[in-house]
Amino acid sequence: MKKAGVTLVDVAKLAGVSVMTASRALSGEGYASEETRTKVQAAAKQLGYTPNALARMMKGGKTNVIGVVVNDLTSSVINCFVTALSEEVRKVDMDLFIYNSLGDLGDGKGKRVSQMLHGLWDGLVYVLPRMTDDYLETLEKSSSPIVLINYFRHETSLPVVRGDNVNGAHDAVSHLVELGHRRIGFIRGNAYTGQSDLREQGYVKALSDAGIELDPALVYQGNFSEQSGMDGGHHLLSLAEPPTAIFAASDAMAQGAMTAIREKGLRIPEDISVIGFDDIPSAAMTRPPLTTLRHPFDAMAHATVQELVRRIKGEPGRRHRIEFPSEFVVRESTGPAPAGSSSKRSRLRRV
Amino acid sequence: MKKAGVTLVDVAKLAGVSVMTASRALSGEGYASEETRTKVQAAAKQLGYTPNALARMMKGGKTNVIGVVVNDLTSSVINCFVTALSEEVRKVDMDLFIYNSLGDLGDGKGKRVSQMLHGLWDGLVYVLPRMTDDYLETLEKSSSPIVLINYFRHETSLPVVRGDNVNGAHDAVSHLVELGHRRIGFIRGNAYTGQSDLREQGYVKALSDAGIELDPALVYQGNFSEQSGMDGGHHLLSLAEPPTAIFAASDAMAQGAMTAIREKGLRIPEDISVIGFDDIPSAAMTRPPLTTLRHPFDAMAHATVQELVRRIKGEPGRRHRIEFPSEFVVRESTGPAPAGSSSKRSRLRRV
DNA sequence: CTGAAAGCGCTAACAT
DNA sequence: ATGTTAGCGCTTTCAG
C-alpha cells in the first residue's frame, strides 16, 4: 500500500494521456477538452495524487509563498502581526509560512534560516527582528525581496514598515502630564529592535516639553516580559518618592506592573495610572482595561504584503520607509493624579 | 547588480572546477582537496551564492523540514506547543515551519494546505486541529508521515499524542470537592478537538464519584476565549444559587472568569475558587496565581518529533496513541469552600 | 487540442 | 581527488 511517490506520470499513464496533458488538465491552465480533464481528474483522485510542490516551484521559479521570520512565538505583539500578515497574504492568494528562529538571528543556528530561505519563498518578512549586524548585512545583500516590520536598531537599505514609537510615547506621557502627573515612571524593554529606545525618547521629550525634570530613578530596565514589568512595578513603588503613573514600553510589562500595583494594595487609576504600548488583545481584558498605544496591525500588514508583492513582481519598491502613526487608545487605567501628588512630600495612600 | 540566480554553475565556472566539485567543496561531503575547497568557497562568497533549497530537496527527497499546522496563533496553548516543537525539531537538526490555516481545515481555502504540504516537508504535525471529516480522511490517506497533537474528536488511524483530559479534569474537580465545594460550575469550550467534551466528562465523573448531583444550570457554554470566560463567570455568579467554585475548560476562560468574579466584588479564593486547564504562561502571573492542569508541553513535543522522525525514516511507528497525564498544579486560586456554602440557602458574601 | 523534448539546480552513482 | 552521466517531478517551449 505504498502510496509515496504517486507522480504525474502515474496519473497520465492511468488516464491514458501524456504527462503534459495531465498537467494541463489538473492545473486548469491551457487548453484541454472537458472529456480529458474529467478523465485525468478521476485518475488523480483514484491514485491519491498530490502534486509535488517542490518540482512545481523549481520550474516556475515562483513559489507563491511568503515566509515570516520571528524569534519568539510567545510574544503577543508578534502574533498580532503574524495573524494580520496571514490574512493579508491570503488576500493576494499566496501562502504564508512562519519560521521561529528561537532567539537572535545570526549566532550559531541562525545562519540556517538564510540558507533555507533561498528558493523556498518568493519573499520574506522579518517581524520585530533581533539580529546581529552580520546577519543584517547578509540580508541586505540577499537577492530575494525582504521587508522588515518595526526594526529601528540600525540604519538599513532594506524596506521597513514601522509604527511611530516616538510620537506614540509622547502622546501617552503628555496625556499623563495633562492629568496632573509629575512623577511618571518608565519601564524599558530590551534594546533588540530599537523600539524601546524610541519609546523612551518620546517619554523624555514629553517630560521636557512639560518642563518636568527627568528623574533617572524613575526609569527601570525591564525585558518586555510580564515578569519584568511586575518587578519594575515593585521597584518603582518602593521608591522613597514613588511615581503616580507608570508608562511601560509594552503591554505585557504594563500588565505586570498592574499586578505589582495591586499587590501593594493600590488602586488603578485612583492611586496610580498605567499606560502600555502595543494594544495586544488582552490589554482590553485587564481590569481596569489598559490605556495603551495601538499599532495598526492590519494596515501595517497590508502595506508589508503590498510592498513585498511589488518587489516580487520585479517592480521597484514604492517606499523605503512606510510609517504608521500609533493610535492612542484611552481606556480606564489612567486617571487624574492623586490630590497633592505634585508636592514632593506626598505619599500614596493605602486603601 | 542582478544577483538573482547565482547558481552552482556560476561558482564552479569562476573557481575553474566542475559543478560536482563545487558541490562537494561547499557541502563538505565527500573528498575535496583543501586547496579546491578554499578556492570554491572564495568564489561562492564573491558571487554571493546561496544554494537553492528546492533543488537540493528535490534530489535528496528529504527536506529536513517538519511542518506544523495550526489554526490560530492567538491561542497561548497552541503557541506553547509550537515553541516546544521548535526546540525539539532543532535538537534533531531539522527545521520547522508553521502554517496558520486561520480557522477550520477543510472548508474552502483549507484544501490548499494539503496541496502545499506535499514534498515541502518530510513530516507534518497538526496541533489542536479543527477540521472537517473530509479533511481528516484526506490526511489519513496521505503518504507523508503525520502526527496529531491533542485531537480527540473522531477516531482516526493517524498517530495522536495526547494529554489526559478526563483524569486531569477529574483531579481538578475532586480537589474542589475535597475543599468542601458542592456547587461547582463548569465553563465549556467549543467542540473542535473534542478536548472540552473530555474535560466535561471528567467533571461529571468527579461529581458523581462524590455523590454530588449534576446541576445543568451550572454548566456554561463558552468558546475558549477569555471574553467567553468572563461572560460565563458573570452568568454563573448571577444565578439564584451561584457556585462556590468554577472549573473552566481552559486557562484563558478561567482568567476571564476571574475578571468577572473580581468585578462582582468577590474574592478569590475566599469567596470562590477557580481552576483552569493548560497552564499557559500567564496562568502563573494572574493574582492569585491560577490553579490549573498542565500539559507536559516539552515531553509531548519530544514524543511527537520522535514518532515523526521514526516514521520519516521509514521505521514503523512505535505507538499509535501516546498519552501523557496532565499535571495538577495547585496555586492560589483554590481554597476551602466558604463556610455554610454547602447549605442550599447560602449566599456569597460581598466584600 | 495534445505530445515530445528540454531543462530548472542540484546531487547520487559511477567513472576516471 | 575530480569529472561525467543521469535524473528528481514538473512545466515551458515548440511541434504536431
Image (cartoon, coloured by chain):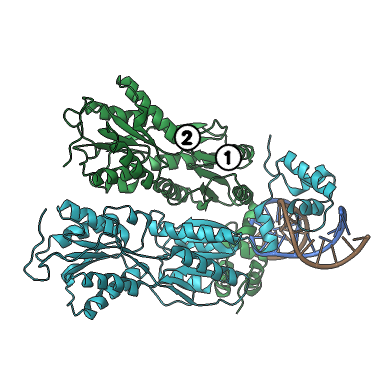
Chain colours: A green, B cyan, C brown, D blue
Left/right of residue A179 with respect to residue B115 in the rendered view: left
Q: Is residue B169 above or below residue A308?
A: below
Residue at the left extreme, as displayed: B345
* x and y percentages locating residue B230 in the rendered image: 23, 56
Mark 1 Cα shell of 10 Å, populated few (<14), some (14-19), many (≥20): some
Residue type at the position of mark 2: Gly
- Residue at 35% of width from left, 38% of height from top? A277
Residue B171 makes an appearance in the image = yes
Q: Is residue B197 above or below residue B87?
A: below
Element assignment for label 1? loop
* x and y percentages locating residue A38 in the rendered image: 55, 69
Residue type at the position of mark 1: Thr
Chain on which label 2 sits: A
* x and y percentages locating residue A86 in the rendered image: 45, 50
Placement of the N terminus of chain B among the 4 image quadrants: top right
Label 2: which residue? A194
- Residue at 70% of width from left, 41% of height from top? B48
Quadrant assignment, res B271: bottom left
Q: CA distance from mark 2 to mark 1?
A: 13 Å
- Residue at 26% of width from left, 42% of height from top? A261
Front one among B76 and B227: B76
Q: Is residue A204 above or below residue C3?
A: above
Label 1: which residue? A132
Residue at the front extreme, as displayed: A240
Left/right of residue A278 with respect to residue A40 in the rendered view: left
Mark 2 Cα shell of 10 Å, populated few (<14), some (14-19), many (≥20): some
* x and y percentages locating residue B135 in the rendered image: 45, 69
- Residue at 48% of width from left, 61% of height from top? B69
Left/right of residue A136 with respect to residue B105 in the rendered view: right
